[in-house]
Amino acid sequence: MPIQSAKGAYDILPNETYKWQYIESIIREICELYNYKEIRTPIFENTDLFVRGVGESTDIVSKEMYTFLDKSERSITLRPEGTAGVCRAYVEHKLYSELNYLTKVYYLGSMFRYEKMQKGRQRQFTQFGVEALGGEDPSIDAEVISLAVNLIKKLGLKEVKVAINTLGDKESRLKYREALINHFKPEIDTFCGDCQRRLELNPLRVLDCKVDHDKPSMAKAPKMVDYLNDYSKNFFEKVLKHLDYLGIEYVLDHNLVRGLDYYNHTVFEVMSKVEGFGAQTTLCGGGRYNGLVEELEGPNTPGIGFAFGLERLILSLEAENIAIPDQNFVDVYIVSMSEKTNEIAFKLQEELRQNYIKCDKDYFNRKVKAQFKSADRYNARFTVVVGEEELENQKMIIKDMIAQTQEVVEINNIVLELKKRLEVK
Ligand code: AMP
């Protein structure tokens, strides 16, 4: 059997790449609008970065990392997410050195997690994420959420909702943690192994459990809002007020805790509401992570960010029947009538390209009919027919593939005539 792609990894074939390029171009456009600059960090990092930066209690670190020893026995991990690498780069390159400067960056790239495969969940997947580092103002939280919402809008997605919650500051969370442990402890033996393990490590994650989701004690669990200190309460109210200023609709979800250990204060998700979308409805997850940079031995730096999965964005566009513009066309397809005209056709092709006319031609000495079939396949706007008879008179034929009309033009004018028709400058 021929070798196949590794389980969980997949090819994006030439007839699909336009979807990715389209979404990527909109992402870049929006990031530019918000003055976020692209950052490209390595695909592999020292394993320690994720253990410290993502957190040992997370599924990502405890079960899902692609970790291996390199030839010098260093433990290396393929990045499972983008925030840790960005924060490492922020510390390593001292991007914090300017006072009162908000570092706003975005990334686009492959992430790797050894997860159970299902629709919308691969082992290699692509994330677009932003990080705003160095600012603690609640308006930044709202700005980051608005960037995510505007991406959704610009893509034309309608069936989405924004869910938001606060995890409060450290003090509030410690109190809440204790309350959760006390609440779940008496019956933790009836919960799944993950929950039992998480209860002491990170009890908030018990609320997130898919297995024990419907247990009555879940619904009765203490709520974070009741444990927020004044600062945290105030902070969250300001975030919501700023979202209101922007007219962004959201739902408060007290059980939204997010899978990563580093979050505090604002956490949010953008979810698809389309029917039949599958189990993985979260398109984007994000939140505040004040303290993470310090954890990585940088200065005390507040931060907030999010990450979208591009595969899920494409799935939701398809589920909402939104067409992605396909750039699959050539301006001109050159049809060569015989072997004798091939040389001229070949030279003409180069000349057209020098003049920014997108073109292609036959490589197999195929019959004229087959060449016209190729022209259709490439959605050629025009064909140029190079025939022996016409060449003798220094002429070529331009055929308009939409109007199905044709004209004979002087060889010397061919580029000009095509440019005129294509409106190329
Ligand atoms: P996370 O980094 O887990 O907060 O995930 C952020 C977003 O990345 C999710 O909402 C998904 O859109 C996407 N994502 C996470 N894991 C996967 C995966 N295994 N396959 C595809 N997309 C994923």
Image (cartoon, rainbow, N blue to C red):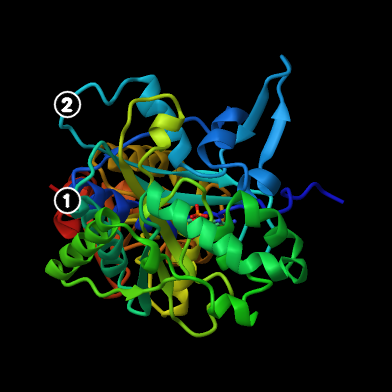
Amino acid at pointer 2 = Leu
Q: Is residue 72 among what the camera can see? A: yes
Furthest residue to the top? 72
Q: Is residue 119 among what the camera can see? A: no
Q: Decide which of 391, 265 is in the foreground and name it.
A: 265
> Regarding mark 2 in the picture, which secondary structure is present there?
loop
Residue drawn at x 25%, y 48% is 31
Residue drawn at x 58%, y 58% is 203
* Left or right: residue 97 compared with residue 114: left
Taking 233 as reference, is 395 above or below it?
above
Residue drawn at x 47%, y 78% is 319
* Residue underneath mark 1: 424
> Regarding mark 1 in the picture, which secondary structure is present there?
loop
Amino acid at pointer 1 = Val
Q: Which label belongs to residue 99?
A: 2
* Left or right: residue 31 compared with residue 308: left
